[in-house]
Image (cartoon, rainbow, N blue to C red):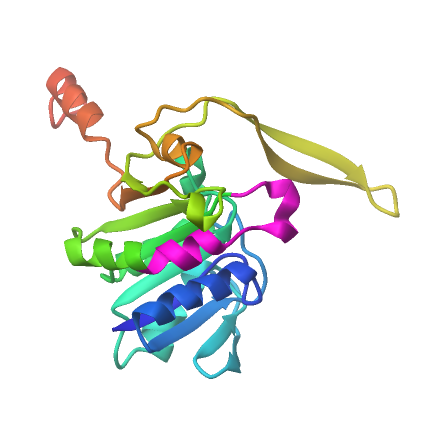
Amino acid sequence: MRILVTNDDGIHAPGLAVAEKIARALSDDVWVVAPESEQSGASHSLTLTLPLRLRQVSERRYAVTGTPTDCVMMGCLQLLKDRRPDLVLSGVNWGSNLADDVTYSGTVAGAMEGCALGIPSVALSQVCDEEARENIDWTPGEVHGPGLIRQLLTAGWSDGVLMNVNFPHAAAAAVKGWALVPQGRYDLQSTEIEERRDARSRAYYWIGLRRRRASPPEGTDLGAVTNGKISVTPLHMNLTETAALQKMQEKLGRNRAFS
């Protein structure tokens, strides 16, 4: 099995090394193509107005001056075009990619691009205390990641679907298993814009998300990790909201002409 590993935290991120360990527990044929610098929040963006640079870091390890989407494209359509990967792993991200965050996530986008290319793909994230970034416990992914992915691959999933996996903020021995759950929704969050001044007194701004503790339902991705479990959520590339579509078709008809 050929595995392509990418991320959004950059080629030197510690979580990328964890993803490589997971991949090497599954196969000897592992390739890494990751962004040259951090691309958090890049979502499913790709670079169209600038050229991309590809730098070989070591054997089967490459850095790209672009987004996670660019990296998966370069890996699948350029480096490995003669034989594409059988699996794409994106991560392991520092910090969660749960609930509303999946729409911003470059980690999820790396798996999304693999999915768009017809390759089974998994996004991997490690829930952590974001104020203690240098002291993240990566053992949940290292210990439980390979076995979990083997089980998911054995079960299989539909085309157009990717798996979003979040490891809880706990030591590996304290993880209480894993749960297949739907995407939740944050009930307590706010977006803040902080204004600062540079050396020439010109304004510049930082955008940040501020999380506050909540009590999410157990049957969601948020609830699973809060209760010490690994959350596994299938995400679909088709964003159509079927229930709303059907209700509107019933009220308005499938097609309407202008009078």
Above or below residue 256? Residue 99 is: below
Horizontally, residue 128 falls left or right of residue 232, namely: right
**Residue 248 picture location, percent across and down:** 18, 21
Above or below residue 35? Residue 184 is: above
Quarter of the view holding residue 83 = bottom left
Q: Is residue 130 magenta?
A: yes
Above or below residue 191? Residue 2 is: below
Residue at the farthest top position: 251
Which residue corresponds to the image point at 36% horizontal and 74% vertical from the top-left? 30
**Residue 237 picture location, percent across and down:** 27, 46
Which residue corresponds to the image point at 38% horizontal and 64% vertical from the top-left? 22
Horizontally, residue 256 falls left or right of residue 218, namely: left
**Residue 72 picture location, percent across and down:** 38, 65
Of 252 and 178, nearer the camera is 178
**Residue 56 picture location, percent across and down:** 51, 81
For the record, the magenta segment spans 128-146
Horizontally, residue 80 falls left or right of residue 138, namely: left
Image quarter of the C terminus: top left
Which residue corresponds to the image point at 32% horizontal and 43% vertical from the top-left? 177
